[in-house]
Amino acid sequence: MAQRLATEYVNASLRLSEVQMSQFVHKVYDPHVRQMVKVLDNGSQEVVLEDDGGEEVHLPFDRRDGYYVCELSFRLEKPHLTNVMRLLFAAFKGSGMVTRIFNGFMMMYYYQDGRVRKIVEYSRDSYKLVFELKDTLGELHRIYRNNDVEREIERIHGSINTLLDKRIIAEDPEAVTLIDDELRECTRRLFVLEA
């Protein structure tokens, strides 16, 4: 198994309520990682996480519209702090790009609201899509709500009724032939739509 050299968070963001901020501060369970919270003048907070090896990350949470918002980019190399940040990022629905750097390749994880949406592997010469979250349920809802086919079927039924009315009163054999051709085309289209 390849050994990770570093993990980079790029344009990472967290948006926490007052209750979530309190939970965030008490969520670090790793005995190798210490935390310190600095409360700033304007009600904002800065959470500092530091591991036994001296690596640390400063997470500035600005107070905005009743929420604590943290937006930043940073790089981690030690496994304890990296693991703690991964757990916090997922638990508190972080968004952004997380790059795990290995010798000879990188894995880029695209997070949205704490869930991995896409994973791409980049090597020196190429890239490969490893995973992409498909919104299957949402797609099924869109298809279910899409009633274009039903509306076209209704329109064709109306056309058929109109053509049948015209055919009943038509006396010219050439007009009847044209109406019959249009009726055949309508029934062909209906067969396709209803199949």
Image (spheres, rainbow, N blue to C red):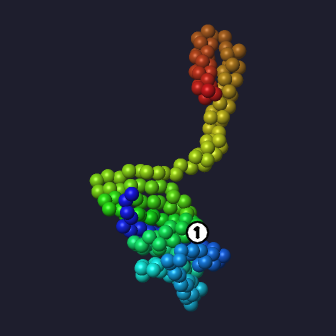
> Is 36 located above or below residue 16 in the figure?
below
Which quarter of the rendering shows the N terminus?
bottom left
Three-letter amino acid code at disc 1?
Answer: Phe
Residue annotated with mark 1: 92
Q: Residue drawn at (47%, 55%), measured in percent from left and top?
A: 118
SS at mark 1 in the image: loop
The answer to whether residue 53 shows anywhere in this view is yes
Observer-nearest of 15 and 3 = 3
Observer-nearest of 83 and 21 = 83
Which quarter of the rendering shows the C terminus?
top right
Where residue 124 sits, quadrant-wise, is bottom left
In the image, taking residue 4 as reference, residue 38 lies left or right, namely right
Q: Residue drawn at (68%, 28%), measured in percent from left and top?
A: 158
Q: Residue drawn at (41%, 68%), measured in percent from left and top?
A: 7
Q: Residue lying farthest top?
A: 173
Label total for image: 1
> Is 188 located above or below residue 136 in the figure?
above
Where is residue 16 shown, x and y percent of the image? 60, 73
Where is residue 172 shown, x and y percent of the image? 63, 10
The answer to whether residue 66 shows anywhere in this view is no
Q: Residue drawn at (51%, 71%), measured in percent from left and top?
A: 84
Q: Residues within 10 Å of mark 1 (few under 14, many from 20)?
A: some
Observer-nearest of 144 and 180 = 144
> Is 183 located above or below residue 131 in the figure?
above
Q: Residue lying farthest left?
A: 125
> Is 194 located above or below residue 70 in the figure?
above
In the image, taking residue 23 as reference, residue 129 lies left or right, namely left
Observer-nearest of 104 and 174 = 104
Where is residue 70 shown, x and y percent of the image? 52, 75
Where is residue 99 shown, x and y percent of the image? 41, 64
